[in-house]
Image: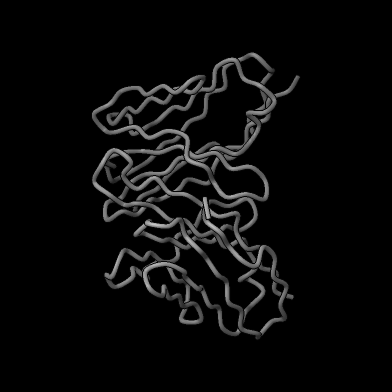
């Protein structure tokens, strides 16, 4: 597709359930990022994938959060045993992450709005 | 750690005026700074990038300045229109291909 695609657009779950959020980046983009945005807050970095390198997981808030990127393309963010404080919009972005002029301009999906009841 | 400050209060201006948004940062000196626009229910959209050795960058009605001494970037929209109403985020390159985003400033352009 032309842009970054995220699914589902909305997810309502019960506390304690596991959820999976999907991100399909722009074709050819080597870098993929996950962010969390709570109401009225900025973007909180969660995890970053770059090519075949080990992901930068420094932003994951707890071990209930994990992510994988298969074949250097689609990524899945998994939240286990969801808590009410996990409710937020989860945004995915991809970039070329090159040293050229367009270095690290990030292209975002529309996000997944997660509501934990 | 890096701290980025954007005015958390919404900025209301009249159509046709120039809107000026501020982004201040502490500690680390980024190699470049980016501005994004975010509309409700959507992800941020890239607008402009300015490097540390550039004082000013323009794109149509948009202008960004970057003062590395003051550790500040200003984002200007001239001849503002109601369609410019959105939240504007600044983002700093912290190295390693990661960006740190500010909390954003909501702009409302009124008729």
Question: From what the image shows, is residue B106 above or below residue A55?
Answer: above
Residue B25 falls left or right of residue B89: left
Residue B29: image quadrant is top left
> Horizontal and vertical percent for residue A38?
61, 58
Q: Residue at x 61, y 66 (%)?
A: A7
> Horizontal and vertical percent for residue A92?
50, 60
Please state which of residues A90 and A64 is positioned toward the viewer in this rendering. Answer: A90
Question: From what the image shows, is residue A40 above or below residue A15?
Answer: above
> Horizontal and vertical percent for residue A91?
54, 59
Residue A62 falls left or right of residue A41: left
Residue B60 falls left or right of residue B39: left
* Quadrant showing the N terminus of chain B: bottom left
Question: From what the image shows, is residue B76 above or below residue B37?
Answer: above
* Quadrant showing the C terminus of chain B: top right
Q: Residue at x 74, y 75 (%)?
A: A117
Residue A75 falls left or right of residue A51: right
Question: From what the image shows, is residue B15 above or below residue B108?
Answer: above
Residue B27: image quadrant is top left
Number of marks in picture: 0
Please state which of residues A56 and A39 is positioned toward the viewer in this rendering. Answer: A56
Q: Which residue sits furthest front?
A: A1
* Figure coloring: one colour
Q: Residue at x 42, y 33 (%)?
A: B48
> Horizontal and vertical percent for residue B59?
44, 23
């Amino acid at each position: 597709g032309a842009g970054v695609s995220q699914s589902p657009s909305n997810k309502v779950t019960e506390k304690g359930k596991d959820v999976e959020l999907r991100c399909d980046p722009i074709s050819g983009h080597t870098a993929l990022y996950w962010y969390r945005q709570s109401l009225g807050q900025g973007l909180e970095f969660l995890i970053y994938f770059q090519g075949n390198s080990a992901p930068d997981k420094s932003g994951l808030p707890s071990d209930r959060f994990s992510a994988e990127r298969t074949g250097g393309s689609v990524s899945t963010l998994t939240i286990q045993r969801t808590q009410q404080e996990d409710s937020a919009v989860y945004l995915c972005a991809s970039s070329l992450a090159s040293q050229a002029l367009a270095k690290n301009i990030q292209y975002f999906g529309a996000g997944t709005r997660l509501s934990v009841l | 750690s890096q701290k980025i400050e954007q005015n958390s209060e919404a900025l209301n201006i009249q159509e046709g005026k120039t809107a000026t948004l501020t982004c201040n940062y502490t500690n680390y000196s980024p190699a470049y700074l980016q501005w994004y626009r975010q509309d409700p229910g959507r992800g941020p959209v890239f607008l402009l990038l300015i490097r540390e050795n550039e004082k000013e960058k323009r794109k149509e009605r948009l202008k960004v300045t970057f003062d590395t001494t003051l550790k500040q970037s200003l984002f200007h929209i001239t001849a503002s229109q109601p369609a410019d109403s959105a939240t504007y985020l600044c983002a700093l390159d912290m190295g390693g291909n990661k960006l740190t985003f500010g909390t954003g400033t909501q702009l409302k352009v009124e008729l």
